Image (spheres, helix red, strand yellow):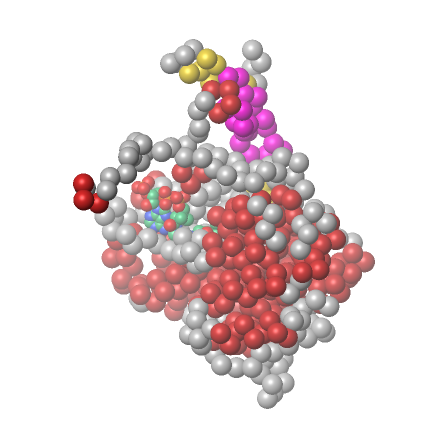
């Protein structure tokens, strides 16, 4: 028996199964259990997939114990400091950092796909003004598949490539339009002279009646926020995109499913929930009361923006965002922003609290992102839209990787059935 195996033994029958332990480039090793049911007639059960790898991937790596996040091997801190979102998007999708010519060509390609079909804009009229912008994103992104019948063959590499470019290029236009619709302002068309984040800011905040000047500090901070949110291995929304894509659904439909999953307050919706929580807490003097509630097992209140399924140390993105918040607020003359000071104090006392220390709960990416975006003038109901906009490239990269994965099959989990045993139908007069 090789020492590099995990031996399972069914003590009811004495039957054993040796599973080879496979070690990736980094992270915990795995055992491939695909043969388990066929060999042993047993399923595994893992609600929430806490001990289950759904795929092999080369895109993103997280070491939750050490608080490490790598995109294609590059530390997130270095990319946030030195890269741009479009360069990081190239890296995530292609696997390598581009040279100058490749980056220029990629940016040019994105720039010339930023406009949406004029008829797509009609979809917005079907939404009430007070519709949550995430509801609009789910609908409009899914509707893109109605406009690109010429490139929906997921087995055609060129169709996959043009769909990826269209999604990446158009998601800012669609996101900005969802904001403009909610405030009753006219949509602003993309400006091909601007880079990705500057163009997004202009589409969000320009109005036809006056010149709009992009604030370079805000544009740079936004670009960094997009880099930090771009991918995060097999999180709930990425797993949703992979599962939807595994059925052969077109990429627009799969990404729309990912947007829906991201919306939940336990996932990408947490950034909006953090701002709501900070407004509810209101003042540092109320922090002890809320911390007590957060640590009371009988109280459903949770500190939004804290805790993570994988990180049992600081989320490296939260650290970068905390520094960025300080920079942006200072640049905007709001270094005394009360919400930021409240968030810093909440983080300080939580990290000193035994409950949070014992459960290894740290601020995650959602804890500070809303404070920066709020300072930029982005309303809280748009925070998750910005998250979806950034994560779109991660979803696309993961979807493309899945489609060409030789191990790829339709995702179809099994279950442990605990319902009624078989029984016969009774006529209603006999019940
Ligand atoms: C994102 O997966 C990703 O990578 C996601 C993401 C990405 O980039 O895609 O990183 C983005 O979704 C970040 C997370 C944003 N969500 C929040 O901030 C919501 C608040 N946090 C949680 O509800 C919670 O921490 C989760 C959902 C993030 C993680 O949940 P888990 O892994 O299922 O852990 P858990 O809920 O079982 O928590 C473990 C313990 C529990 O106590 P016990 O049942 O063991 O007694 O810690 C407690 C929880 O009650 N706990 C918290 C807490 N988070 C967990 N207690 C108080 N406040 C919190 N925030």
* Residue 144 image-quadrant placement: bottom right
Instruction: Tell which of 363 and 276 is nearer to you.
Output: 276
**Picture coordinates of residue 143 (x, y %)?**
57, 64
Relative horizontal placement of residue 359, taking residue 220 as reference (left or right): left
Is 408 located above or below residue 133 in the figure?
A: above
User: Which residue sits at x=61%, y=63%?
Assistant: 146
Count of numbered marks: 0
Outermost residue on the right side: it is: 101
Outermost residue on the bottom side: it is: 209
Is 300 located above or below residue 337 in the figure?
A: above
Outermost residue on the left side: it is: 430
Instruction: Tell which of 125 and 303 is nearer to you.
Output: 125
* Residue 371 image-quadrant placement: bottom left
User: Which residue sits at x=67%, y=42%?
Assistant: 404
Instruction: Tell which of 237 and 24 is nearer to you.
Output: 237
Is 285 located above or below residue 158 in the figure?
A: below
Residue 110 visible? The answer is yes
Relative horizontal placement of residue 98, taking residue 240 as reference (left or right): right
The residue range painted magenta reads 17-36
**Picture coordinates of residue 373 (x, y %)?**
50, 67
Quadrant of the rendering where the C terminus is positioned: top left
79 in magenta = no
Quadrant of the rendering where the N terminus is positioned: top right
User: Which residue sits at x=62%, y=43%?
Assistant: 402
Residue 204 visible? The answer is no
23 in magenta = yes
**Picture coordinates of residue 33 (x, y %)?**
52, 27
* Residue 87 image-quadrant placement: bottom right
């Amino acid at each position: 028996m090789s020492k590099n195996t995990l031996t399972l033994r069914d003590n009811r029958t004495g039957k054993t199964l040796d599973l080879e332990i496979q070690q990736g480039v980094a992270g915990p090793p795995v055992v491939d259990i695909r043969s388990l049911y066929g060999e042993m007639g047993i399923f595994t059960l893992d609600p929430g997939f806490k001990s289950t790898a759904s795929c092999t991937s080369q895109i993103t790596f997280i070491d939750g114990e050490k608080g490490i996040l790598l995109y294609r091997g590059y530390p997130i801190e270095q990319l946030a400091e030195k890269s741009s979102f479009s360069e990081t998007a190239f890296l995530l999708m292609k696997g390598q950092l581009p040279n100058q010519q490749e980056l220029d060509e990629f940016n040019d390609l994105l720039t010339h796909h930023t406009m949406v079909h004029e008829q797509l804009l009609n979809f917005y009229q079907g939404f009430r003004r007070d519709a949550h912008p995430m509801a609009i994103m789910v609908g409009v992104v899914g509707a893109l598949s109605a406009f690109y019948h010429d490139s929906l063959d997921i087995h055609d590499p060129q169709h996959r490539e043009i769909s990826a470019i269209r999604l990446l290029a158009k998601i800012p236009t669609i996101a900005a339009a969802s904001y403009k619709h909610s405030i009753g302002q006219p949509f602003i068309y993309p400006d091909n002279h601007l880079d990705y984040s500057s163009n997004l800011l202009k589409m969000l905040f320009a109005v036809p009646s006056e010149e709009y000047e992009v604030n370079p500090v805000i544009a740079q901070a936004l670009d960094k926020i997009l880099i930090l949110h771009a991918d995060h291995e097999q999180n709930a929304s990425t797993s949703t995109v992979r599962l939807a894509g595994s059925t052969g659904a077109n990429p627009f439909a799969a990404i729309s499913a990912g947007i829906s999953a991201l919306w939940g307050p336990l996932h990408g919706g947490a950034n909006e929930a953090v701002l709501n929580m900070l407004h509810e807490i209101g003042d540092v003097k109320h922090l002890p009361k809320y911390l007590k509630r957060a640590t009371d097992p009988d109280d459903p209140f949770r500190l939004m923006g804290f805790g993570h399924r994988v990180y049992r140390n600081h989320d490296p993105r939260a650290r970068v965002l905390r520094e960025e918040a300080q920079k942006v607020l200072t640049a905007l003359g709001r270094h005394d922003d009360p919400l930021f000071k409240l968030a810093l104090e909440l983080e300080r006392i939580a990290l000193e609290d035994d409950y949070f220390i014992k459960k290894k709960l740290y601020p995650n990416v959602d804890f500070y992102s809303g404070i920066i975006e709020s300072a930029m003038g982005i309303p809280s109901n748009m925070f998750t839209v910005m998250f979806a906009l950034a994560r779109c490239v991660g979803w696309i990269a993961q979807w493309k990787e899945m489609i060409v994965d030789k191990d790829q099959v339709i995702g179809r989990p099994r279950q442990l059935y605990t319902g009624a045993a078989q029984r016969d139908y009774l006529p209603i007069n006999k019940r």
